[in-house]
Image (cartoon, rainbow, N blue to C red):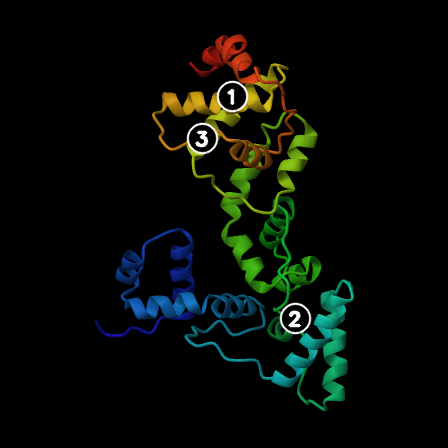
Amino acid sequence: MKLKSLSLEEKNKVLDRVDAGESMRLVCEEFGIKSSTFYDIKKSRDKIRKYSLSLEDPGRSKKVQKRIKPTMFVDLDQAVYKWYKHERASGINVRGVDIQNTAVSLAKHLKIRGFHASAGTMSKVTPQKGKRVRLSVEKKLEIVEKLEKGTSVSSIMAEYAISRTQVYDIRATKKNLRDYSLKTETCVTTKEKKSALSIKSIKKPKFSTIDEAVYDWYREQRAEGVPVRGIELQAVAMRIASILNIEGFQASGGWLQKFSARHNISNQPIGGENSAQYVEESDQLRLDNSLL
């Protein structure tokens, strides 16, 4: 196979396919590339995403580009980043305008000519390293809305103190974020909905079918005003696993803790040596009827 040189846009599409879970073989066939090229693109993910976002500035050329050029102001880039690390280590919140003003001052101090702290230039100079800021689902949805309304990437980076890569990743996962947001509409109380949107990552559990079924049952009980205990959730989970013939599942205390955290459920544990028998006997009719 002849080695093919992909454009920046095509490389981003390759990364999008990878994020969607598509296999290497299918991606290579679609874009006509070798496995070595595929792995090189994955390895350069951050550089590709970072440079792509910098091109979103309306003043930049829209010509097709295949290679990523380093910043013109290497010394200034390093000086700004050193200042940025010092400010963040001191607990000081750094805004985009602060970075621009500092960059201008440092450029004068370093006697660097031709530098202008424009949005386009700063999108390449703004520090990207350091501790990654983790945003809640609610904040990520805010960013999605702002991007769709035309807010610049640089402004969002400054407002939320996040990197270009994070902005790009948030935009790429907007469907998952909105799907999750729609699910929170079924929360019984405003407090539960707010709590659900405060989580910082959306991870699909190993036994997702059981997870979804148990949560549907839980919501039905709450909608009817029926209090639900942790031990009942465990009993329902085991019952569902049995009905669906799912092997290897155990409704352990660890599972209950993770399930409750995923769905922001506060359970009051029930004690006593006969608690399991209590659920088995006194609640069996309610559990069976609700699962049919």
Circle 2 SS class: helix
Q: Position of residue 263 (x, y in %)?
A: 58, 33
Task: Tell me the distance, in whole angstroms, between the alpha carbons under discs 3 and 1.
Answer: 18 Å
Mark 2 and mark 1 residues within 8 Å of each other at the beta carbon: no
Which is nearer the eye, 75 or 72?
75
Work out which quarter of the rendered image holds the N terminus and state it: bottom left
Q: Which residue is mark 1?
A: 217
Residue extending furthest toward the front? 273
Q: Quadrant of residue 249?
A: top left
Q: Which quadrant of the rendered structure holds the C terminus?
A: top left
Residue 117 shows in this picture: no
User: In the shown orientation, is residue 87 left or right of residue 289?
Assistant: right
Q: Which residue is denoted by mark 3 in the rendering?
A: 250
In the image, what residue type sits under mark 1?
Answer: Trp
Q: Amino acid at mark 3?
A: Gln
Q: Residue at the spot x=70%, y=71% of the render?
A: 85
Q: Earlier in the sequence, mark 2 or mark 3?
A: 2
Q: Is residue 79 above or below residue 25?
A: below
Residue linked to disc 2:
119
Measure how far apart labels 2 and 1 are at the Cα level.
51 Å
Residue drawn at 52 percent across, 13 percent down: 277
Camera-side mark, 3 or 1: 3
Query: Could you tell which of marks 2 and 1 lies nearer the N-terminus?
Result: 2
Kind of element beneath mark 3 = loop
Q: Is residue 141 shown above or below 229? A: below
Q: Position of residue 149 (x, y in %)?
A: 61, 52
With 10 as the anchor, is 99 left or right in this view?
right
Q: Is residue 145 visible?
A: yes
| Residue 67 in the image, given as x and y percentages of width and height | 43, 77
Q: Give the residue type at disc 2.
A: Ala
Q: How packed is label 3: few (under 14 Cα within 10 Å), some, or many (20 or more)? A: few
